[in-house]
Amino acid sequence: MLQTIRRKIRYKVLKHRKEPSPDLLSEIQARRDKLRSQIDKWRDSQKIVMFQVGDHVLRQSIQGCTTNTPEEEILYIPSSFEEDERISLDLIVLGEYERRILEGAACDVIRHLRTISKTLDAMIAGKKKHAYGQARHTKATSQIEDAKAWQQEAIDDYLSIRKSLITLGMTEKDPHFPPLSINDTKRLSTYSKRAVGDSRRLDGKIWTANAGVTSGARLPASAATGGPSLSSEQGPVATQSSRIKRKLGYRCQWIYATILSPGKAETIGKNAPKGKQRKLENPTPTGLSFPHSFAFSLPNIPLRLAR
């Protein structure tokens, strides 16, 4: 929570340096006041949980370098120390707790980054389709630039969390939390027509399953040991085509049953999915017509029917 507020204040400060604004400056000051009160609460809890770091906190307070800039103040949590310092200060257990919290935070940032990326793609497509005229074009461009800034902010948040995880012992080549960039957020549109060469373009790491970032989820024990994975045990997902086939299957069964046995047709109609039963009540479905005479055969039962 504190780290998130600190990063947001830093972004606001950088934006104010590029485009000075009284409103933005007042917002920065309000955020700093809120952060200062939360840091003071953290220091009170830190005296009980991490009393070993009291000397570091006192030394920073005496220097007074971060009095007006609380976003630059060191919190002195386990990830603020190297491994040998954590061992000497007896912060190994707390470091393990922080590592788990940071992994969860990294997963949240990845999901947030996915949402921003989807929104950005929709905004770009909407601009091409609807932003006609100078006023709408300018507004859409401004909104897209804000979304790109949010996207970069989320990536920086993830990289900061990843850096803390590395400090706490995670390897730099960890497959679940690799480094990310803007290129890793690219994906093919799910609603636009495919263009030439799309089959050779791969989605970024935040979208690909079983490669790169998979929402931070660790592999199950069976997959890690080479056993059967959960994905191999799952059946195929029902697609629109399979639903159409099932609908046609009920319709065909009902037609043949109507010809051979009205009682059986009524049974099939009752067993049909909801929404299909009302359609099956019509003796002759819409668009269906029988010829004056036709012949068909079931196994070993030749039949000839007349209209």
Image (tube, rainbow, N blue to C red):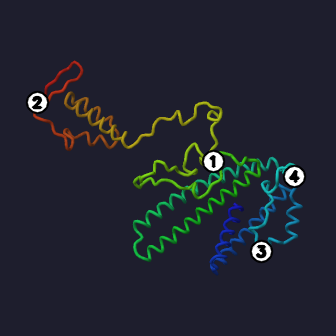
Callouts 4 and 2 close, C-beta under 8 Å: no
Q: Which residue shows up at 47% across the image and 61% down it?
A: 122
**Which comes before the other along the chain, label 3 or label 4?**
3
Disc 2 from disc 3: Cα separation: 95 Å
Marks 3/1 in contact by CB < 8 Å: the verdict is no
**Tag nearer the camera, 1 or 2:** 1
Q: Determine contact: label 3, label 4, CB under 8 Å.
A: no
What percent of the width, then of the height, locates residue 277? 29, 40
Alpha carbon distance from label 3 to label 1: 36 Å
- Decide: is 41 above or below 28: above
Residue 222 in which image quadrant: top right
Number of residues whose C-alpha sits closer than 10 Å to that of mark 2, classed few (under 14), some (14–19) or many (20 or more): few
Question: Quadrant location of the C terminus?
Answer: top left
Which residue carries the number 1 mark?
Answer: 216
**Image vertical order of residue 179 relative to residue 297, above or below:** below
* Residue at 78% from the left image edge and 50% from the top image edge: 95
Report crowding for label 3: few under 14, some 14 to 19, many 20 or more residues within 10 A (C-alpha). Answer: few
Q: Secondary structure at mark 1?
A: loop
Q: Nearer the viewer, mark 4 or mark 2?
A: 4
Q: Which residue is mark 2?
A: 306
Where is mark 3, residue-wise? 68
Question: If you read the primary sequence from the N terminus, does the residue marked by circle 2 or circle 3 appear first?
Answer: 3
Which tag, 1 or 4, sits closer to the chain's start? 4
